[in-house]
Amino acid sequence: MKRVVIMLAGVAGLWGTMAAAQTQAPASQWTIQDFAALPLMDQPMLSPDGLHIASRVAIGGEQRLVIADVHEGPDRIHMLGLGDNDLNWWKWVNDDWLIAGVGNESNIRGMPWYISRVVSVKRDGSKINLLAKNVAAQNADDVIWMARDGTPRILLSYQTSIYSNDAGFWPKVDEIDVTNGRMHSVIAPREFVRSWYADATGTVRMGIGYNDSSRTAKLLYRPDARSSFRTVDRADRRRDESLVVPLLFTADPARAVASDDHEGTDALYELNLDTLELGAKIFAAPGFDIGGIEEDAAGTALAGVHYTADAPSVHWLDANLAKIQADLDKAVGDRRARIISTSRDGQRMIVHVGTPDQPGAYYYYDTAAGAMSLLSRVSDKFATKTRLSPVSTIHYKARDGLDIAAVLTLPAGKDPKNLPFILLPHGGPFARDAERWDWWVQFLAWRGYAVLQPNYRGSSGFGTAFAEKGEGQWGLAMQDDLNDAVDWAVKQGIADPGRVCMVGASYGGYAAMRAAQRDGARYRCAVSYAGVSDLGAMMRYDRRFLYHGTRKDWMKEQAPDFASVSPIGHAAQFTTPILLMHGKKDRRVQVSQSREMAEKLKAAGKVEGKDYIYVEQPLADHHFSREADRLDFLERLDAFLKAHNPA
């Protein structure tokens, strides 16, 4: 783990810069750099008292964790210097301390291993601790509980060995004082138990065990700290069985809240912990799966439920938050207000206001004072009143009659007829697109392209049956869904059938490769960022990870014949120009997936610079964390499209 330090480095005036009004260039003066810019503020989180903020902030083209007082100005701002470490998450423990999950790839016995850790940071920047630093092994960032009484205590579940024949390979749970790193054991490791769950009091109540060799799972449970764990349920993955796991332990020790999809979509239900039977339905979003939940201040009841219909939404069960949300919705008109973070008493909060065609801004809202003040714009390039290219949700029918939702972005100020067209499938593939701000999409629309983002079969969020329709269909029916999206756009008169390009990242990059190989006659060009070209190689890479057997089973369900749907085995069939780009520091999809695809294209007689272009970004990751990599990508994408599918 690389060193992590607190810096007061050169941030005087930063807070004022973020909050100050800024001049805005008109659309005619926007540049590629404007779209490539990192968010000025991202995922801000309030301390329990609501007087301090921890947020990811763009500084010098890179992302930093910044801690700041709300009211006292730039002299109370501190940056967390991460070096080469990833910043994966952060949370306030109390008003003076926060914790952050960091990670880094290390070379162990010639193999890359991803090491995760938790650091605790004092709010004033005077102290930082690497927790469990002398005993933790590979995975050590699973914080399963934080004290709610103001004391600086957490429960950390972590490995102490990387060897599966050691007891420490299975995580133990320790209580840790984040101010000094002192810890004492709470739960000893148990064979095959990988995940532990605690209630709001800090009592570890549940463990999930999984044996990858037999594909069997078990649920360990106890009602209180005095009782012993007992196995209360089992499941066989080979029979497609699953366990019902609580999302929230309520104040009643015999009751919990869980999600289940027995009615076709994930919905929230009461759960009887004595019988493991589901009770009354708490909330469902008809036609859509629910997402995450928001707990109340005590951690024993639901405050809200997240879900995505056409756009991300939240249903507040807390009456006070529901009223505030209604008031905000009324105040912002056709813009969208999202409560991002609240103080423990619910009086102070951070609210994001924006639209899918405007990145918006974060505001600090003190409900007692009735005042909402600007914290930071997401972008200083696009003023909060400026709207870019309009975004909407459309539906089309796949060739087998399946209804598919897709997000359509049309270039502002252009007649939506016979336009150059970009098909942009999402990654995952168990993910989905929705109406939200997207810097990549808005750049393409600014350049004059209509952009369509289909939620093809196998996408998440639309219920179990829709997800299952993707099984066995990687590169097959899922690819047909993408072609059918183009046919819809052509039939509607939106797309010029002779000017269509597929662009995507991760699984979307795989789909772009597959389009260039399988359906080249349909597409003028294809662009893959961090795409998968070889499913077999991906599985061989995954052998080093826990539960690789189950992962392989799952992949075989998605693509029974890896070779037939892996573009790398069919390089000679590529018939349309393709741009391949990949970050060398990608820890999700190995850079070799694109590198070897380029080598195969060359070996098949394809001409570099004409039939394909390969660009390897030496410092880029999977998520465009650096502004320089975003800009490099957009510039190369822009040049490639001008050459092969000009607007």
Image (tube, grey):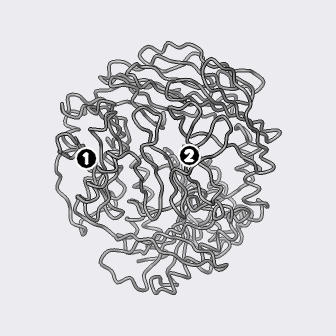
Residue type at numbered disc 1: Tyr
What is the x, y in percent for residue 108? 66, 28
What is the x, y in percent for residue 144? 54, 30
Element carrying mark 2: loop
Closer to the camera in the image, 572 or 531: 531
Checking the image for residue 363, the label placed there is 1
Q: Is residue 61 left or right of residue 418?
A: left
Q: Where is 324 relative to 96, above or below? A: below
Q: Where is 72 relative to 585, above or below? A: above
User: Which of the two discs, 2 and 1, sits closer to the camera?
Assistant: 1
Checking the image for residue 521, the label placed there is none
Q: Where is 617 relative to 567, above or below? A: above
Answer with the quarter of the image where residue 599 lies: bottom right
Mark 1 crowdedness (10 Å alpha carbons): few <14, some 14-19, many ≥20: many
What is the x, y in percent for residue 336? 32, 59
The C terminus, quarter of image: bottom left
Q: Where is 458 relative to 297, above or below? A: below
What is the x, y in percent for residue 282? 52, 50
Mark 2 crowdedness (10 Å alpha carbons): few <14, some 14-19, many ≥20: some
**Alpha carbon of mark 2 to alpha carbon of mark 1: how far?**
33 Å
Closer to the camera in the image, 522 or 494: 494
Closer to the camera in the image, 101 or 338: 338
Q: Residue at x 66, y 34 (%)?
A: 274
Element carrying mark 1: strand
Which residue matches tag 2?
586
Q: Residue at x 53, y 32 (%)?
A: 252
Q: Is residue 304 left or right of residue 142?
A: left
Residue type at numbered disc 2: Asp
